[in-house]
Image (tube, rainbow, N blue to C red):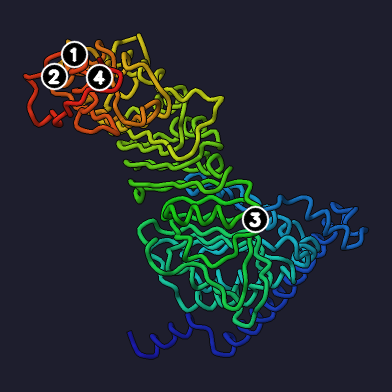
Amino acid sequence: MSRNSLFSRRKGITPPLEELRARLTNAKQQFSEMEQEINGLVNEHWELLQQINHIHDPIFHRLPPEITSDIFQLCVPEISFDTESFNESNDDDIWNGITLRLGLTAVCREWRRLAFSTPHLWTFVPVHFHKEHMQRNAEVIQEWLGRSGQMPLSIRAYANERWTPSTEAVNLIDSINRESRRWEMLDLRMPYKFTSLFVGDPEESGLSPLRSLRLEVNAMEYELPLGFQRRNVTSRPVNVLLTWVRLKSVEIQWDSITWVEVEGGIYMDECLELLKNSPKLKHYHVIVHRLINDLTIDWPVMGTMPIFLNKVGFPSLKRLVIKGGRGDNAAEELASFFKRSPCPVEVLVLDDTLYTSDDIISVLMQVPSVIQLELLMDDDEAPPEDVNLSPEGFFKFLARTSIIKDGSLPTFLPNLRIVWFEALQAFSWDLFPHVFGPLSELHNPLRRPLESFHLSFYADIPDDHYYIIDKEPALDLLAIRKAGLDFVVEPEANDGFLFRSLDYHGIPYDDLEDSNNPDVSSEPPPDSE
């Protein structure tokens, strides 16, 4: 094929340059016409939407904006302070309320404009610091804060344990701090060390409007010396919920508190200090995990025991000492406490707290874990004359329940080994030896393992301190001593009253070890012949 023929063929396939330019001009003209047509359709689309919105909303556009704003506020639920504990708290209601607010802005342009200009809708500010795209989230929150105008704010901030504050997050916290004059509720659920970032506006001073404070932090970090502290500001909230936060790390005034719940990370001196400094308190609930296994409570103020015991729990408590509380109906409150909040108490000391047998039994029925029991009385204070303080009922119940029998009696102190008991009134000595149970059942595995009973007895003791018990109880106590069980009766230690009674009744006790014989005086008791 010749070169001229090839050129001719190519010329027949490829249009000349002038023709290509003409076709390009024509395409541009058609595109411009189509673009104008699309723009016209878009404008027509928006005009039709506005007409539709105008038709479907025949009321709101005729109402004053203030009325419409009030209607909007009535359509969305209030988001109140979350009083549920951290295990029971459910965020679904919160986010449903937020979704409803955002839904108002999606109906039409007019509704969106009006909703955005209704500050009350945007007073609850949720912040997820650990979410992705923090820059965009920060912009949204900034807009949210701006829409709230000058209304009081409720801030709820979330961050998980892996969160590390980014520049955007720090800037956002600064923005929230600058609005601290409007903080009405502050709810921080984040690692402990980051709660201290919410210090408020450094130029703010005086009394803070903060009414509700919730701090929920990582349980492993509660010992860090950080918490909630404000600069030159006094916070006097009404509602406080703390989870694994030490009270001493929260700088607030407690005199206005009416509702408080604390879980974990609290010490008992702080609990009592809180009670003392909260005269308006109506709701008080404390749960202490792992920290408390030895607790002493002294009640100097009447009326505090019911408040405290009805609102606390100690799932790890091993030793409990309670002093005082007679006038607070201590038996009922203690029984209710142990029944509601079982704890593995092994050593229980009730000092001047219970003083009737019914009181003692009702409480001890609820603590089968007790190994050592101390029931002490204030012998310096005259007991009430109209109250039966004799321990006979308690001694009888110990004897009746010394052997566990299926279906006969509720299990009563099945682990008890040691008892210290102070008696303020006289009792029949015939009862005391039987608290150990029948000696014939000493090796019965169903027998209560009681092995030591220390009895302090001061009532009806003659001034010369000579005391003689009847022959039968003396024989029973002698048998108990021979069986290897331990009992001590004060004020005469070393079995002085027992040996004197045995001598008085002519009962030999030579087979007892000499160490148990306290060199009894040869002088006979005053009432002997």
Q: Earlier in the sequence, mark 1 or mark 3?
A: 3
Q: Quadrant location of the N terminus?
A: bottom left
**Residue type (three-letter) at the residue carrying disc 4:** Phe
Q: Which residue is mark 3?
A: 98
Q: In the figure, is residue 190 to the left or right of 211?
A: left
Question: How far separated are the C-alphas under marks 1 and 3?
Answer: 73 Å
Nearer the observer, disc 2 or disc 3? 2
Q: Is residue 469 above or below residue 456?
A: above
Residue density around tag 3, few if under 14, some if 14–19, many if 20 or more, within 10 Å: many
Q: Amino acid at mark 1?
A: Leu
Which class describes the residues within 10 Å of circle 2: few (<14), some (14-19), or many (20+)?
A: few
Corner quadrant of residue 191 = bottom left
Q: Secondary structure at mark 2?
A: loop
Q: Looking at the picture, how far across and down is residue 30, in whole percent? A: 68, 76
User: Label 1, on which residue?
Assistant: 439
- Is 366 in front, or is 283? 366
